[in-house]
């Protein structure tokens, strides 16, 4: 009986107090300094797509009703859930804090959320902005390209993300050239063979590590013979003629002697082809092998040729090469000594 009376007494005095307080508010007199800051929501909330966002509202014990709203839609009012979205849950509803959590946040959740409270029958709101960040993602990129020298190319790299990612193009190999474009598009007019190689598109915002994708640019050009080396070989020895050509696609090689094509399988001769090099090998050079050979390098864009001499030891001394001439003298020396010795 006693306790009931005490309770009744308490509630009566509470009603009187709240009535007075309401009166004060309506008269525009703040009940307590600092009240204007209630309810206090946190600063803007920034989360990444897929993460959970906590919306906190700091209140005090004079608050009688609380709610969180998404724009004008009530998400929670007190302990009651008003929205159907299963990702929205109540975290705490105490005398000091009223917070909810939005799980698995997506971009469409971005926007203003409102904490609405009633203190002494007086509504107040506080707004917090939910900002959703999304890692950069390259959604469209040009495929590898094969182009003839002199033509124009245009590479595209489209990326999404929040904030909008910065897209750049770099030429990374065979030589690291560096930035070649500061946006989604890379246009090259009159492409040269030096501009072939790997290009890397990079999309970055501050949300996550930049994402990169590569595009291989192949620049085709006709063969160019960079080295055609003749050689002097005595009869009975092994001799090699060498022809080096750069080309894209790789050159195919053919050898001619004078105007006659050297066919594969000719006795004592072998052709060794590599992508940038062809060797004509004579296993046992004979007198009639000497002469003027022509190396022809061709690909789908064109062909070129170079003439290479296979000459005998007589011709070796004619070559303006002091080293080989001196070498010739050294070979003669033992013969001279032998000749002298035999005379005695
Ligand atoms: C919160 O976000 C909104 C909208 O993006 C912006 O106008 C406001 O300045 C931000 N407030 C703070 C405190 O960052
Ligand atoms: C907030 O409102 C927007 C617009 O109506 C809606 O797309 C989004 O799903 C809502 N998010 C939450 C967590 O209620
Ligand atoms: C390359 O682009 C230039 C300038 O737009 C144009 O004049 C030229 O005809 C183009 N070349 C080719 C091979 O398309
Ligand atoms: C090279 O050819 C000559 C003449 O046909 C022959 O006498 C000699 O034995 C051959 N040498 C070798 C290493 O095959
Ligand atoms: C070799 O032949 C080519 C053409 O077949 C000619 O242009 C060149 O002068 C010749 N070289 C020699 C040393 O005879
Ligand atoms: C080598 O090139 C010249 C000039 O382009 C051409 O006249 C000649 O026929 C070519 N020789 C061969 C064997 O292809
Ligand atoms: C041969 O070499 C010498 C010295 O290196 C040089 O002076 C001369 O001009 C060369 N001759 C030819 C035909 O290349
Ligand atoms: C001279 O001949 C030697 C031996 O054959 C060779 O190693 C050298 O490269 C030649 N030098 C020149 C300048 O042709």
Image (tube, helix red, strand yellow):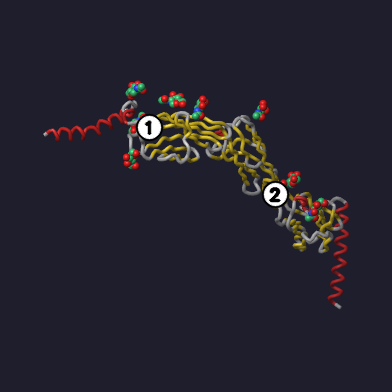
Tag of residue 288: 1
Tags 1 and 2 in contact by the CB under 8 Å rule?
A: no
Give the position of the N terminus as an image quadrant.
bottom right
**Image height check: is 40 above or below 306?**
below
State the mark number for residue 134: 2
Q: Residues within 10 Å of mark 1 (few under 14, many from 20)?
A: few
Q: Nearer the viewer, residue 212 or 93?
A: 212
Q: Is residue 276 left or right of residue 48?
A: left
Q: Quadrant of residue 157?
A: top right
State the quadrant of the C terminus.
Answer: top left
Element type where label 2 sits in the image? strand
Which callout, 1 or 2, points at the residue further toward the start of the chain? Answer: 2
Tell me where residue 237 appears, x and y as whole percent: 34, 38
* Mark 1, secondary structure of its residue: helix
Camera-side residue of 311 and 141: 311
- Quick one: 224 or 236, which is closer to the camera? 236
Specify whether 195 is left or right of 285: right
């Amino acid at each position: 009986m006693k306790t009931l009376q005490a309770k009744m007494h308490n509630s009566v005095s509470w009603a009187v107090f709240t009535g007075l307080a309401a009166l004060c508010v309506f008269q525009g007199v703040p009940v307590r300094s600092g009240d204007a800051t209630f309810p206090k929501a946190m600063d803007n909330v920034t989360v990444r797509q897929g993460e959970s966002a906590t919306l906190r509202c700091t209140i005090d014990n004079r608050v009688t009703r609380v709610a969180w709203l998404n724009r004008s839609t009530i998400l929670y009012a007190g302990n009651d859930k008003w929205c159907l979205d299963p990702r929205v849950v109540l975290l705490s509803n105490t005398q000091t804090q009223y917070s909810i959590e939005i799980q698995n946040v997506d971009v469409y959740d971005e926007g203003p959320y409102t904490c609405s409270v009633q203190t002494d029958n007086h509504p107040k709101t506080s707004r917090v902005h939910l900002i959703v960040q999304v890692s950069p993602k390259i959604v469209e990129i040009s495929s590898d390209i094969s182009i003839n020298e002199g033509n124009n190319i245009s590479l595209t790299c489209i990326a999404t993300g929040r904030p909008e990612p910065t897209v750049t193009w770099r030429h990374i190999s065979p030589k690291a050239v560096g930035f070649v474009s500061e946006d989604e598009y890379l246009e090259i007019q009159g492409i040269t063979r030096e501009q072939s190689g790997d290009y890397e598109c990079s999309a970055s915002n501050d949300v996550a590590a930049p994402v990169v994708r590569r595009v291989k640019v192949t620049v085709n050009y006709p063969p160019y013979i960079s080295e055609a080396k003749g050689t002097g070989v005595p009869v009975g020895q092994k001799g090699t003629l060498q022809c080096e050509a750069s080309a894209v696609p790789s050159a195919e090689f053919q050898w001619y002697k004078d105007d006659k094509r050297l066919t594969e399988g000719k006795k004592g001769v072998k052709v060794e082809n590599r992508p940038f090099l062809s060797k004509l090998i004579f296993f046992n050079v004979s007198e009639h092998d000497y002469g003027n050979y022509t190396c022809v390098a061709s690909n789908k864009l064109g062909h070129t040729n170079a003439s290479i001499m296979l000459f005998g030891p007589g011709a070796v001394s004619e070559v303006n090469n002091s080293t080989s001439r001196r070498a010739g003298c050294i070979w003669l020396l033992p013969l001279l000594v032998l000749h002298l010795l035999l005379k005695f």
